[in-house]
Image: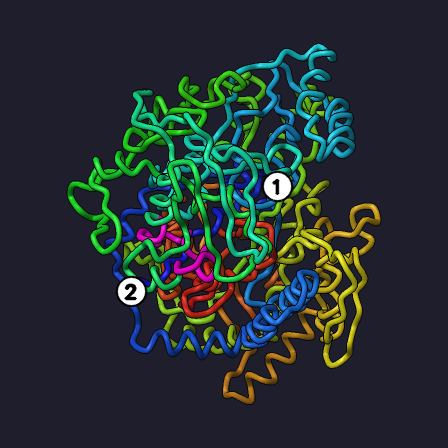
């Protein structure tokens, strides 16, 4: 059986394109200047093999660093109610933060922006892929004034859940003199590696594919799930184990030329899930242990897919059977794991199922480009030019074509090498929006041209959490796909000392407490709003709240959290009880509403020094002397050609070295280009391929509406998508 690959983390690139002068601050996953999907195919040319005893070492390192988190997280399954489950999740998250194996840097948002798009008309949910569906977005020919945005934002809050906001906003914009467009043009910085929706967990792929197909359900701009290829919301059995959908009749599959291939039926969803489980590209973890038989099929314990809990009762009736009641199951349908697959077309391009599946077969061409997939969504990809443009035209066979306001979507390449390009494209009417806001230099340009005061607004934060990771088990000192790329200058003695140091929790905390995240983010956003995008937890503190009173054990004390308590408050209670100086949630933040965003909850020089002093004493007892003459060296790769990322790397280095008095040196490893940088850690599949001591190029966006979607990523034994960033599994 093939081990699950950990390929799903969000590119820090995808966040700051044009966002700043420094790099990916506000989106620690910023896309500024990233030649993103530059041929991840070269990963097959790996120069690095798995070290002997790697699994045993991974377990030992994991248990030492994350054992407390894992022990706490396992208690979640014993919860007697959904609210108790969430409370136990929050306590486990505190243990994860205390381990200091990573530090959150930012969310996606919190930067200045100028655009012609009503942000509130986009699908509004913190998880899944629907926030990249743009067929209902409101786009105007004129730049939208910030005063009108304030009015619309307030109205959105008032109308949320009524299903009436979009029409109100369209009427309002028209009444204010704006002209609505039927096209939308915006930038991108990562060409898809594949166009197969079921065979990728890379955000850089999914955000391009999502507009080519419809799912069963789709979240609207008010955060409410609406029927799409399903006629209605599912019916659920009394025991919570069976979900039944009625499939919309008459929906057509077409090829890239719009030629009809057949009708969408329940069988296409069965084929789609089997293909996902065959590919094991990272999506399969979502249904392991959730859909009956999925785990056994993935492990090869069963080969008959009819034993998996997805069934076409008839052409238009689809049934999912679960292992146990899963309260968040109905939040999962906007993700690619549930995408339908036109079985006949897939097979015509060499696709096979089960033990016969072989993506390397010479006749297997499905998903290799936009002309080799079947479409059932609102758009057909009519043109693609690598690192240039992707054009989507309305699918005239689309089941809801008559109600399709956006008839054309155009993506234009912006690798971030010009930090002002995003704004210039807006000002020249080349684009309608940026990817993630304005860079600091763009802000100054907008001010100089008189476009800032009337049109600049701050993007809301979303559910994405970007961060910086610590490699606890480094074995690679050059890139896995090219032994001449990203080479470290560390000697064997330095490697040994570094490895011992990073496996001390107080040393790790010292590094992360010494990291000035505000200045780091300011490289991308500008100093005046540098804290806006700061995130201080993994799961956003306001991700959910308790629906009933819950009593849980906090360090031996029965502690009751009343209904309405936010997730982050419970995490903070555990941190406070453990005496760890992290403020993951602040009740006074967000104008007293409480938040895990918008303030500095980690950086503290005094706390960093105290943690370092304790680490020095403990490591000395283990035979490792740390002094100004014998500092610990940590490699941090960065792309010197991208101004924002370069500035951010230097902020990281400067703040840590100054705070820790010369006992730690951050060695910046210059990557010749963005692609080289990506291969130090983003395009790796296993921890032993990661070529860094510190890494700030990735993040995570939740796949469904439960804290589990975040916390599962740090599980052991190849189950956690993010765990490999720590150099293990």
Report x, y in % for residue 154. Answer: 78, 31
Tell me which corner region of the image, top left, top right, bottom left or bottom right, holds residue 560.
bottom right
Relative placement, left or right, of 551 versus 3 is right
Evaluate if marks 1 and 2 touch, with contact meaning CB atoms under 8 Å apart: no
User: Where the C terminus falls, by quadrant?
Assistant: bottom left
Q: Residue at x 64, y 45 (%)?
A: 522
Side of 294 where 97 appears, left or right: right
**Mark seen at residue 615:** none
Q: Is residue 217 magenta?
A: no
Q: Nearer the viewer, residue 460 or 470?
A: 460
Task: Give neighbour class at mark 1: few <14, some 14-19, many 20+ (Cα, 10 Å).
Answer: many
Provide the residue designation for mark 2: 1
Judging depth in this view, the residue of 385 and 382 nearest the camera is 382
Q: Position of residue 330 (x, y in %)?
A: 56, 48
Which residue corresponds to mark 1? 125
Magenta part of the protein: which range?
A: 276-294
Residue 555, given in percent of the width and then of the height, sits at 72, 79
Residue drawn 72% across the image and 40% down it = 528
Q: Tell which of 187 and 651 is nearer to you.
A: 187
Residue at (61, 57) in percent of width and height? 707
- Where disc 2 sits, the SS reads loop
Please name whichever residue, 122 or 437, is drawn nearer the observer in this view of the structure: 122
Q: Is residue 20 above or below residue 463?
A: above
Q: Is residue 673 visible?
A: no
Q: Answer with mark 1 or mark 2, whichever residue precedes in sequence.
A: 2
Is residue 282 one of those drawn in magenta?
yes
Q: CA distance from mark 1 to mark 2?
A: 35 Å
């Amino acid at each position: 059986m093939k081990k699950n690959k950990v390929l799903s983390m969000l590119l820090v690139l995808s966040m700051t394109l044009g966002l700043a002068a420094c790099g990916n601050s506000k989106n620690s996953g910023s896309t500024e200047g990233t030649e993103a999907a530059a041929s991840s195919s070269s990963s097959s040319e790996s120069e690095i093999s798995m070290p002997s005893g790697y699994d045993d070492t991974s377990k030992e390192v994991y248990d030492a660093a994350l054992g407390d988190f894992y022990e706490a997280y396992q208690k979640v399954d014993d919860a007697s109610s959904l609210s108790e489950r969430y409370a136990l999740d929050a306590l486990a998250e505190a243990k994860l933060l205390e381990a200091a194996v990573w530090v959150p840097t930012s969310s996606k948002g919190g930067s200045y922006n100028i655009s012609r798009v009503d942000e509130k008309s986009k699908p509004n949910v913190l998880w899944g892929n629907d926030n990249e569906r743009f067929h209902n977005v409101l786009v105007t020919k004129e730049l939208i004034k910030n005063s009108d945005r304030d009015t619309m934002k307030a109205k959105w809050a008032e109308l949320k859940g009524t299903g009436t906001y979009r029409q109100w906003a369209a009427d309002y914009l028209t009444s204010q003199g704006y002209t609505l467009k039927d096209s939308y043009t915006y930038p991108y910085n990562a060409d898809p590696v594949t166009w197969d929706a079921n065979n990728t967990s890379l955000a850089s792929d999914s955000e391009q594919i999502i507009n080519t197909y419809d799912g069963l359900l789709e979240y609207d701009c008010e955060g409410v799930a609406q029927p799409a290829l399903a006629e209605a919301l599912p019916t659920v059995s009394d025991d919570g184990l069976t979900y039944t959908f009625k499939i919309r009749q008459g929906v057509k599959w077409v090829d890239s030329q719009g030629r009809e291939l057949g009708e969408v039926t329940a069988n296409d969803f069965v084929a789609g899930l089997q293909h996902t489980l065959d590919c094991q590209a990272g999506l399969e973890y979502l249904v392991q242990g959730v859909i009956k038989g999925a785990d056994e099929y993935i492990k090869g314990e069963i080969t008959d897919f009819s034993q998996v809990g997805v069934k076409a009762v008839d052409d238009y009736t689809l049934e999912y059977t679960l292992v146990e009641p899963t309260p968040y199951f109905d939040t999962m349908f906007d993700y690619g794991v549930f995408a339908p697959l036109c079985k006949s077309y897939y097979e015509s391009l060499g696709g096979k199922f089960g033990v016969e599946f072989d993506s390397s077969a010479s006749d297997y061409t499905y998903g290799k480009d936009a002309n080799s997939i079947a479409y059932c969504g609102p758009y057909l990809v009519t043109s693609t030019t690598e690192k240039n443009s992707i054009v989507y035209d309305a699918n005239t066979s689309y089941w809801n074509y008559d109600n399709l306001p956006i008839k054309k979507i155009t993506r234009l390449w912006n690798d971030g090498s010009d930090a002002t390009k995003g704004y210039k494209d807006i000002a020249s009417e080349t684009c309608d929006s940026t990817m993630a806001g304005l860079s600091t230099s763009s802000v100054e340009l907008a001010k100089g041209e008189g476009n800032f005061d009337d049109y600049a607004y701050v993007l809301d934060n979303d559910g994405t959490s970007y961060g910086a990771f610590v490699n606890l088990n480094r074995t690679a000192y050059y890139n896995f796909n090219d032994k001449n790329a990203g080479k470290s200058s560390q000697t064997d003695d330095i490697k040994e000392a570094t490895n011992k140091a990073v496996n001390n929790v107080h040393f790790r905390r010292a590094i992360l407490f010494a990291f000035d995240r505000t200045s780091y983010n300011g490289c991308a956003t500008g100093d005046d709003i540098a804290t806006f995008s700061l995130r201080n937890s993994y799961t956003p503190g306001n991700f959910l709240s308790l629906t009933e009173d819950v009593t849980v054990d906090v360090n031996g004390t029965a502690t009751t959290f009343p209904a309405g308590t936010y997730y982050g408050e419970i995490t903070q209670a555990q941190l406070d009880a453990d005496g760890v100086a992290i403020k993951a949630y602040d009740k006074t933040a967000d104008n007293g509403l409480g938040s895990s965003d918008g303030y500095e909850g980690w950086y503290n020089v005094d706390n960093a020094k105290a943690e370092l002093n304790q680490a020095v004493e403990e490591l000395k007892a283990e035979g490792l002397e740390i002094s100004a003459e014998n500092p610990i060296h940590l490699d941090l790769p960065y792309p010197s050609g991208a101004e924002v990322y370069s500035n951010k790397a230097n902020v990281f280095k400067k703040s840590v070295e100054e705070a820790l008095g010369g006992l730690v040196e951050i060695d910046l490893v210059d990557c010749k280009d963005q692609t080289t940088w990506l291969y130090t850690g983003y395009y790796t599949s296993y921890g032993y391929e990661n070529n860094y001591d510190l890494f700030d190029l990735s993040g995570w966006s939740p796949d469904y509406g439960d804290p589990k979607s975040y916390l599962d990523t740090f599980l052991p034994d190849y189950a956690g998508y993010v765990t490999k960033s720590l150099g293990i599994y």
